[in-house]
Image: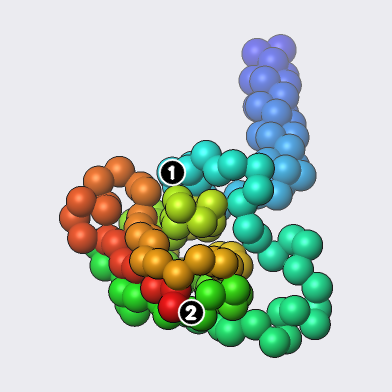
Amino acid sequence: MENRNTFLIIGILLAVVVVAVFVVQGRGGAPVEQALESPAPAASPDVDTQEGTSGAELAMMKEVTVEGDEYKFSPSSISLKAGESAKVTFKNVGKLPHNLVVTELDVATETIGGGKEDTVTITADEAGTYAFFCSVGNHRSLGMEGNVIIE
């Protein structure tokens, strides 16, 4: 009788484990590094992203790739003409979570882990220099910043 109870308990535990695995896989099975990433900065509802941009606009749009590593961006500046839009692909080539934020233009990528990328659209109608930076922790004060220069 004691062996039968032991097998019953083991069976119940295995069933619970199997159900837990299916539940985790059902919600997408997010990798551990995603759970460790910092949330993206709060952005206003009019943040400029790819949504609402037509295929024709994307085909004519300037494309820029910015790589982020531990405490620097490369390149550290993006130059555009007033009214010109740029599709900016931010690639995190570092190990820590990073993002790219241009507060004055209401643009922010997601905070992403190493080896990942996110894309946003930057458009500025007025000439000027706008800072972009990583808003994670103290990354900006450690040198992770650059400029969008609108001529």
Q: Secondary structure at mark 1?
A: loop
Q: Kindly identify which residue carries mark 2.
A: 80
How far across and down, in percent of the image, does residue 54 sit? 80, 73
Q: Residue at x 72, y 43 (%)?
A: 27
> Is 127 situated left or right of 51 in this image?
left
Residue 121 vs 46, above or below: the answer is below
Q: Quadrant of the N terminus?
A: top right
Q: Secondary structure at mark 2?
A: strand
| 10 Å crowding of disc 2: few (<14), some (14-19), many (20+) | some
Between 78 and 117, the one lying in front of the other is: 78
Q: Residue at x 65, y 48 (%)?
A: 46
> Does the image show residue 117?
no
How far across and down, in percent of the image, does residue 3 sit? 66, 20
> Does the image show residue 79?
yes
- Residue 79 picture quarter: bottom left
Amino acid found under the numbered disc labelled 2: Leu
Q: Earlier in the sequence, mark 2 or mark 1?
A: 1
Question: Which residue appears farthest toward the left when viewing the image?
Answer: 142
Residue 38 badge: 1
Residue 100 vs 93, above or below: the answer is above
Cα gap from disc 2 to disc 1, whole angstroms: 30 Å
Question: Which residue appears farthest toward the top when viewing the image?
Answer: 1
Q: Residue at x 27, y 52 (%)?
A: 139
